[in-house]
Amino acid sequence: MTPARHGRTAAVLSGIGAWLPPRVVTNDELATRLDTSDAWIRSRTGIGQRHFIEAGMSTGSLAVEAGARALKSANLDSVDVVVLATTTPDQPCPATAPLVAARLGMTAVPAFDVGAVCAGFVYALSVAAGLIVSGTVGNALVIGADAFSTLLDPTDRGSGVIFGDGAGAVVLRSGEPDEPGALGPFDLGTDGEHAELIEIPAGGSAQRAGGVPTRADDHYFTMQGRAVFKHAVLRMTASVQRAVRRARWTMADVDRVAAHQANSRILHALADQLGMAHETFLSNIDRVGNTAAASVPLLLNDAVADGTLRPGQRVVLTSFGGGLAWGSTTLRWPELDVV
Ligand code: COA
């Protein structure tokens, strides 16, 4: 490890990568097995297609592909720690991060998973940034990867049309607080009183200790869509405002918002609440849907690739999901290669 030695340190973004499994699932394909339509999905969510994993793939394999690209973008072969945000680990035990680290050629580094559902990537980023700023590590690979297609109830048209699989990753290194790419203060929060709005009822210790036989359906992801929608707008609005204040910016300083891609109507409502133009909000939801923990890094990667996110722009990252959990941070976008 190469801990920071002196002065004020910050965690600085120095690499980015993403990966999508090749199989594309169109709205029309979903409409062959769910009571829905391309027109409904596009108008109510902004989603046109998503990617699903196939046999032989898993969250780990998505994470390895995205992680390898982020390392290449940072010109590194290895890092001091691997932090993986996911709700769909390869197995309940062990964590997926050590397997991912090993497949990336790192067999002696700390590697662990972070669980904050769709807010997971921002949480993982905050943990890795804390390890860097405390001098525990000199750099970190932070990955958001999920395969929600493996959790979906085949009869649930609400959640069934939203989610897609994918992975995004960034490399952080120790640097100066005022250089491009330096992460600003984080705003993080949860409200467990509304945990039941997004859940998988079975598969954990509560269900097993209860001795209650589970129904197959209890292993599926469930979401109360309309209530979640309202919380998403409220929580992300307040979180963005706090993160901007903590960075000593004003809303007028913000050039781009990279928000969790849950529903394009949520993004528009968030922009309206914040008094920002819809165009300020980066979006790739039409092509990938809601990729859970992968959403924000995948969005950043795509926005760099298509030129909507450019060096020097002031960016807010914000995310929201099960927990309920939310998190935001700020940075001035650095020069990065997308590979
Ligand atoms: N196709 C067609 N009709 C559908 C449908 C679908 N895929 N999903 C729901 N409907 C129907 C409902 O049955 C309902 O019909 P009714 O009025 O006859 O009862 C109607 O559309 C409205 O249902 P509602 O659940 O209010 O839809 P919605 O506009 O809220 O859209 C979601 C549903 C899931 C797309 C939306 O609530 C959503 O995006 N929620 C937030 C998700 C989120 O942010 N998740 C973040 C954590 S990961």
Image (spheres, rainbow, N blue to C red):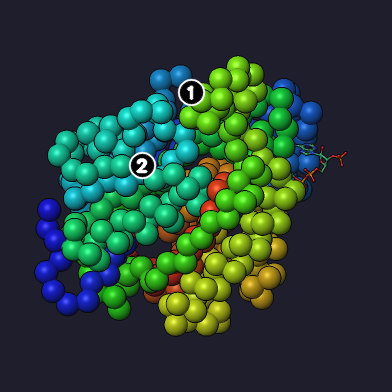
Locate residue 82 relative to residue 58 in the image: left or right: left
Q: Is mark 1 within 8 Å of ligand 1?
A: no
Q: Which percent across, then down, holds residue 24?
A: 56, 32
Q: Nearer the viewer, residue 120 or 266?
A: 120
Around disc 2, counting alpha carbons within 10 Å, would you say few (fewer than 14), some (14 to 19), or many (20 or more)? many
Number of the label disc, if any, that sits on residue 54:
1
- The residue positioned 33% from the left and 50% from the top of the image is 142
- Quarter of the displayed picture in which ligand 1 can be seen: top right
Q: Mark 1 or mark 2: name the one nearer the start of the chain.
A: 1
Locate residue 140 relative to residue 154 in the image: left or right: left
Q: Which residue is mark 2?
A: 113
- The residue positioned 64% from the left and 49% from the top of the image is 194
- The residue positioned 51% from the left and 25% from the top of the image is 209
Q: Which percent across, then down, holds residue 78?
A: 18, 46
Residue 194 makes an appearance in the image = yes
Q: Which quadrant of the figure has residue 49?
A: top right
Is 47 placed above or below 240 here?
above
Q: Nearer the viewer, residue 314 or 187?
A: 187
The residue under label 1 is which amino acid type? Glu
The residue under label 2 is which amino acid type? Asp
Q: Which percent across, then down, holds residue 243?
A: 48, 72
